[in-house]
Every structure is written in structure tokens, then in C-alpha cells.
Image (cartoon, helix red, strand yellow):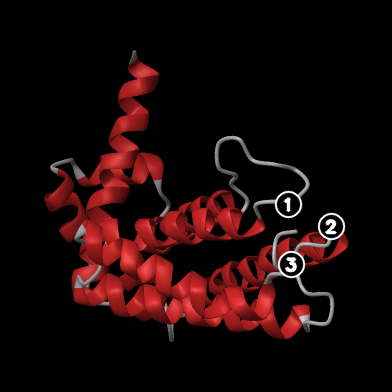
Amino acid sequence: MGRMDADQRKRQILECAKKLFAQKGYYQTQISDIQQAAGVARGTIYQYFKNKDDIFMTILENLHLEMRDIISSKPENYEEDFSNAKKVFKYRIRKAFALFTNDPDYCNILLRVGLGLGDNFECILRRFDNQMVELIKAYLISGIKLGRIKPDIDTELMSNLIGGAFMRMAYYYGVTGKGRKKEEFEKLTEEFVETFAYGIFLEKP
């Protein structure tokens, strides 16, 4: 039970810190602000984290892991032969958009607050971006091998286009709050997928 309580307290500290970083920015947020928001003693924070950098780095790492899982996720009844390649693409885009529209703090931290900070933070942000592009590229290459994605596309270029467009859309909708209504969210997902579908997928035989 004690272990569970400790994990919950750590998550509480991270959640409060995430909101503060998103609202106030990294430099304007102090340990005392996080302490007050989380309702814990200052010493309690240092039981889990070395300093403010460590807290911020942990938030970025958690987001990195969450996005990696989303990009690699598969819908129920996923067909390994990619006969539903477009369905898989749409499923992953929907889940990724949902992460940012449901949690705009993540969006603010990744695309606004995290920019222009130190090398350690920039390294994580670059790794996040590069891994997302590499996962998209691997998906495209697999689809080409299985005859579901056009063989003549430039996978390097297309994966960067998809990744870049996704991050721009995530920022716009995550920050403005648009796309949080179900009908807006579905429209956003559908339009994004259809924008790229024509240039990517072969017609299903």
C-alpha cells in the first residue's frame, strides 16, 4: 500500500508541475509553486526528483513514451497483412490527436514551452520528433512491402510531411481548444487522413 501511495504522490507532483509549466513557462515556475499546487512539503518533492530540471525532464520522457506507444498501437482485429492500412493509419492519428486535444498542457509543453531551453531538453525534443518520423517511415515501408502503399513514394519525405503536419495541427487544436467536441474531433481526424490517403495508399483490391 505504501508503495502505491508513493507512486500516486509522484504522479500528483508531475501532474501539478505539468499544468504550471504549461501555464507559466519553465523559467517562471519554481519548486515552491509546484509544492503549493501539489499540497506537499518541499522535502517531499526532493524525495522523488533532484530539482526542477528533473521534474521537467520526466514530464518530457513520459510524453515521449506515450507517443511512442500510440504510434505503434494497433486497432482491434488488426490484420497483419495491412489489408486495412488506411484504417490503421486513421486509428493511430485519432489516438495521437486525442492525446493533445484531451491534454493541452502536454501540447503547450512540447510545442511551445520546451523550445529554446537547454541542450538536455532539446535532445529529448529532437529524439521525440525523430522517433515519431522513424515510426511513420517504418509503417510506410511495411505497407510498401505488403503492396498496400504506393511503392514510388519517398518514405523519408512523406514521413517528415506527415509528422510535421501532425505536430502543427496538434499545436493549433491543442492550444486553441478546437477539436474537443466529438464532431469537430472526428472531422479533424478524417480530413487529416484523407489529405494524405490519396498520395499514400493503393486501392484495396
Q: Residue at (37%, 31%) from the top-left corner? A: 7
- Above or below — where is 112 with respect to 4? below
Q: How many marks?
A: 3
Q: Residue at (51%, 80%) from the top-left corner? A: 195
| Circle 1: element type | loop
Q: Nearer the viewer, residue 110 or 152?
A: 152
For disc 2, the marked residue is 146
Residue 197 position in % (x across, y down): 59, 73
Q: Which tag, 1 or 3, sits closer to the chain's start?
A: 1
Q: Which tag, 2 or 3, sits closer to the chain's start?
A: 3
Q: Nearer the viewer, residue 183 or 170?
A: 183
What's the distance in space between the residues labelled 2 and 3, CA to CA?
A: 10 Å
Q: Residue at (53%, 56%) from the top-left corner? A: 92
| Tag 1: amino acid | Phe
Residue 35 position in % (x across, y down): 18, 50
For disc 3, the marked residue is 140
On the rendered structure, is 155 left or right of 115? right
Tell me the crowding category of disc 2: few under 14, some 14 to 19, or many 20 or more residues within 10 angstroms, Cα based: some
For disc 1, the marked residue is 82
Q: Residue at (78%, 82%) from the top-left corner? A: 153
As drawn, the residue found furthest toward the front would be 205
As drawn, the residue found furthest toward the top would be 1
Q: Check if mark 2's residue and mark 1's residue have beta carbons within 8 Å.
A: yes
Q: Which tag, 2 or 1, sits closer to the chain's start?
A: 1
Q: Check if mark 2's residue and mark 3's residue have beta carbons within 8 Å.
A: no
